[in-house]
Amino acid sequence: MRERQMGATTGQATGPLATVLRMLADEAPASELAAVLDLAGPHRSPAADAARVRELLDRTARREHEGQALYETAEDLTSLRPGDEVLAAIVDRARTLLACDSSYIALVDPETGDAFMRVTAGTRTEALQRVRQAPGFGVGGYVIQTGRPLATSDYLHDPRIHHDPDVASAVAADDVVSIAGVPMAAGGTVIGALFAADRHRRTFDQDEIALLASLAAHAAIVIENARLFERVQADSADLRAANARLREHRETLERAGRAHEQLMPMALRQAGLDEFATTVAALLDAHVTLVAGDGAVLAEASGSSSGAPGCEVAVRAGPETFGVLRVHRDTPLDEGDARIVERAAQTAALLLLTRRRTEAVAREQLAALVTDLVAGADPGVLERRAARLGVLAPDLLHCVVVAVCDAVPRRALLAAAADLAEPDDGIAGEHAGLAVLVVPGADPGAAARRVAAALTTATGAPVTTGADGPRTGAECLHDVHDLHPGAARGARLLATLGRTGQGAAVDELGVLGSLLADVAPDRVATLLDRCVGPLVDYDREHGTPLVATMRAYFAHDRNPPATARDLGVHVNTVYQRIARIDTVLGDDDWRSAAGGLQTQVVLGFLDLLGPR
């Protein structure tokens, strides 16, 4: 019985049915099976079942193909390729799986809400690739605004679609007829849309829309991941930048700390300015110059780099500015270098302030020494003080110079005198309101004139000086007390005689310089005008030598013949000039015993005054 059934079955598997079975085994298309069904006759029902099996197999194969495409798309999500490359792969797969002419992705502009093309595949015109669609317009505007898919078989004539003329023109230029679009959402927000388009009428079925939606979901993940990745990269870049700034700041602080460790001890131990400049040059590898307020270079040093423009920082302590610190280097100074320069300027200010205070103390000690020398203090004590201060070398000749200037404040004159004396190891101080200097030199007259010229230049006003000496440094310890009065008398006398801004030794002033301690300038002028003034005026107006004749007459004890021989003239000429002198002066009292003494004193003043 079983054999008969099998034989019957086998016998039945002939004709159209057998053909259907073979076509099914060969995986023939369903369309070919349908043609055979028309010839099946009494076997049409089994053949139709075979056709449905073929359709199920085709659908299963298509689902497997779609699933493989989705799997490959998911793999792309885990790749290291840029986001646009993955999106391009997605639109390519959508175009392939849906067998459509073109496919593209549009994203939402977060600022305007417009949809703009991001990636395209299969488009023909640039106009379509540059499309920007306002919300609610076109398939993309509808999908993005509603979050629902939309498919049309006739885009340009579908009444459901609001058309933007520019977008419609771009679609027409690309010959697009049918379009299907699905939303791309991330976190509940629509961020774009995925489209499939054909250049002929086509109805997209639900399976195709579902496949497009699956690809759209993958595309949304890609975009969201790209955004997250960009955010992570930006945050990482910010962290790296912050770490770099922190590292740079730490290095700056460490460098500044090292510089502080080297600079501050220099201020505490009162290092020299040359050592300071050398240290700063090494710290910055630069050329360093410390300049005083008057432009004088106080110290200078070079590192291995120099010459290029750098920076200049004021050297200031409180409200007072001492000068500037200049730093020149081939490479620009960074923030750390700038801080080192600022610290260096502060250190320089401390060094200069300390040096000035030290100099002020030393200057006060030297001034006190001068005061005690003039006062005649104990020579033993003075010797020890001079040795400690390094002045008044025992075997070196010195002169005592007294300076007078009513046009300059006393402190300014004393400061200028100290500045002048110190470079030559001299000393300067004050006694009875006058500046007193003890300076190296063997010629008191030359010393007086040198000091007068230098102080006049330094103060800007004529300074008059008198000098006496010289004495060795050892002798000065007890002789300054005796030399000072003559030098002071000479300075006052020159000022009285109107020779301000000049200098002279007391010996150069003759007997008047030794005798006159204080003479009022107005009394000298009155005496000159009364005794010889008319004679001086006559000589100036007539070119006569009457004053010279008077001076020679007294020089030769009123002896006319001797006077004539001295002047190289005949004795009668001398008598004629004497008579003329009597006439000019109005009497001959100038030749009497009392009048002659007064006249000779006046002639002494006239000699000290010089040419009138």
Image (cartoon, rainbow, N blue to C red):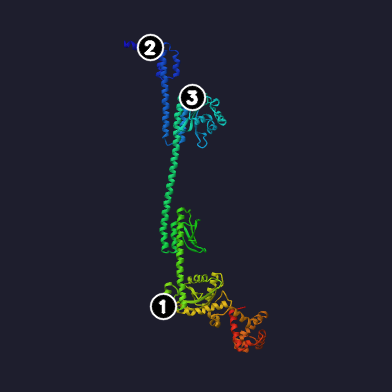
The picture quadrant where one finds residue 268 is: bottom left
Q: Is residue 380 left or right of residue 456?
A: left
**Above-or-below relation of 466 to 263:** below
**Whole-number angstrom distance, CA of label 1 to CA of label 3:** 126 Å
Residue 61 placement (x, y as % from top left): 41, 24
Residue annotated with mark 3: 204
Tell me if 1 is positioned left or right of 531 in this view: left
Location of residue 90 with respect to 477 vertically, above or below: above
Using the image, determine if residue 322 lies above or below residue 101. below
Query: Of tags 2 and 3, which is closer to the observer?
Result: 3
| Mark 1: amino acid | Gly
Q: Earlier in the sequence, mark 1 or mark 2?
A: 2
The span from disc 2 to disc 3 (Cα, nearest Å) is 41 Å
- At a point 58% along the width and 84% down the height, the residue shown is 601
Is residue 504 among what the camera can see? no
**Could you say where residue 184 lies in the image, as x and y percent from the top left?**
47, 31
Of discs 1 and 3, which sits in the foreground? 1
Which residue is labeled 2 in the image? 12
User: Which residue is more in the foreground, 506 or 81?
Assistant: 506
First in sequence, mark 1 or 3: give its number.
Answer: 3
Pick the front one: 201 or 585: 585
Judging by the rendered image, the residue that carries numbered circle 1 is 380
Query: x, y percentage for residue 256?
Result: 43, 55
Q: Answer left or right for 9 relative to 444.
A: left
Specify few, some or many for label 2: CA neighbours under 10 Å numbering under 14, 14-19, or 20 or more: few
The amino acid beneath tag 3 is: Phe
Mark 3 Cα shell of 10 Å, populated few (<14), some (14-19), many (≥20): some
Q: Label 2 is placed on what type of residue?
A: Gln
Pick whichever, 98 or 208, lies toward us: 208
